[in-house]
Structures are given as structure tokens and as C-alpha cells.
Amino acid sequence: MDKRILFPTDFSQNSFNAIRYGMNLYEDQYCDFYFLNAFHVNMYTLDNMMVPEPGDSTYEAAKKQSKEGFVKLKAILKLQEDNPKHTYHTISSFNYLLEAVKDTIAKKDIDLVMMGTKGNTGSEAKVFGTNTVNIMEKIVKCPVMAIPEQFDYMPPKQIVFPTDYKANFKRRELKYLLEIAKLHNAQIHVVHVERESKLSKKQENNKELLEDILLGVDFENHSLPKGKVQEAIFSFIENRKCDMVAFVNKKHWFFGSILANPLIKELGYDATIPILELNDNP
């Protein structure tokens, strides 16, 4: 079956950059690309709690704007080199972004969500950045990849995978990490920031399990000296010139909640390389 990839878009240059990244990343795979624009009407006041419906002028105007955005997007896509392995679909949804994404994942059996870390310029940029991190936090049915603003595509060759080895691993949750590594002959750097003098028995077992799962791809283990996790990982990414970071969203890992954790907040709001957020509940 073709891979089904969802691109939430606000028709900004940033969202198109994420689309272009995804098209290049999966250039050699058969894919159905779903482009989703979630539109809504800002008309709620204390005196007016009416929900706009099809036929209302405000609803129809917002829907028309969404449709026009897709006309422009399709025109841009036509300028790209045609890939017979890729098929395009467009969806305009009168909904909030997170709910529209959840609904599309369920109805279209989406494999992966890809989106930019920011949206339109000005004040809306921070809002869309927040939406991206919110989606990474709330979507558990499939992986989410966030593409930084103005990031130029390059095949991922050095992928960072931070872990504290405190939770066990499942092959299915690492499926897309392994797939991308194999597609692009990338090396996976398993990075552990030391907190104790040595790993516990449970951590040692989880480390062995991870190594077993990674058999078949190029990977290296790295143990970084005690220090702030955020600084250690950012320094590793910079020194090794890594071009992707992947992590599993497990609440009990040292990452904790994405929105509450400084590392992921920094990655989500100020990313310099693509972030692949994997789930233990796909």
C-alpha cells in the first residue's frame, strides 16, 4: 500500500517548505500526499455565540479562501518535477487544526504527519509554532515530523536519537526511524547523557533491546558526561553536523511532557533541523 502522508498547511512559504521536504524525503516511494487546510471564522462575541454553517456569508468566505489557497498550492506543485510515484489530495476542513488533523488521520489512515514549525509572518508565526508543538504532544496515532523554517532539503545522513534507556523499546514505534535511515543510508547516533555512574540492570537490558532493533542499520552509541541534557544534545547535534533528531514521545521518559520540557520546547519553537517525533501508541 502507498504511504499516506498528511501535510497541514496554512499556505505559507513555511508550510510549502515542509511539503517540498517530504516530497524529496520520500522521492523513491509511492505516496499519497494529503494537504489539509483547517479554516474557521473568528466571529464569536458575548452577543453572538452562533456557530457559522454552510451557506452563511462568513463561512462561505472562509471556505472560498481555503479553496483559493489550494489553487495556488497546486500551481506551485506543477512547477516541481513530476513524480509518477506521488499522488495529491486536498482537504478543506472547517475545524480547529488539531481536531482536523485527528479527524483526517482516522478517516484517511494516515501514516505520518509532516508540517512546518511556523506559519505566516508576524504574530501568527508564534501561534503556528505553538500548534506544531501541540500536535506533537497530542497526536498519538502516528508519527509527526516538524520541518524548521527555511530549512533547505538535504538527505538525512546523521540522525540523533537521545534516550535515557529507562523505558523499553518496541520495533513498531521505531519503524519510521529505521525506514528513513535505510532510505537514505543514514547513521543513527544513540545519545545518552549520563546521570548516574553506571546504567541499572533495567537500563542495560533496554540498551541491548534497542541495539537488537537497530541491527541492519548503521548506528553508534554515545555516552555524554553529566550535564544539562538540553545543552549536551544541542552541542552534539552541532558538533556532528546532524540533520535530523528523533525521539519517542513517552511521558515517563526524561523528556516528560513535550510542552513542559525545555528541550522539546526549544526544538519545537526554534528548530534548526527536522524533528521526528515517534509514538509508543501508533
Image: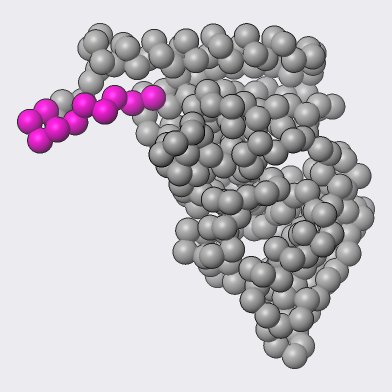
- Can I make out residue 140 in this image? no
Q: Does 82 sit above or below residue 257?
A: above
Residue found farthest to the left = 47
Which SS does the magenta portion mostly show?
Answer: loop
Residue found farthest to the bottom = 197
What residue appears at the point 88 percent right and 64 percent down from the top-left corner? 220
- Counting from the top left corner in percent of width and height, residue 221 is at 85, 69
* Magenta-colored span: 39-48
Locate the N terminus by quadrant: top right
Report which quarter residue 262 is drawn in. Answer: bottom right
Q: Does 64 sit above or below residue 47?
A: above
Q: Does 172 sit above or below residue 99?
A: below
- Counting from the top left corner in percent of width and height, residue 75 is at 62, 9
The one of 177 and 264 positioned closer to us in this rendering: 264
Side (left or right) of 181 relative to 108 = right
What residue appears at the point 82 percent right and 62 percent down from the top-left corner? 239
Residue found farthest to the front = 122
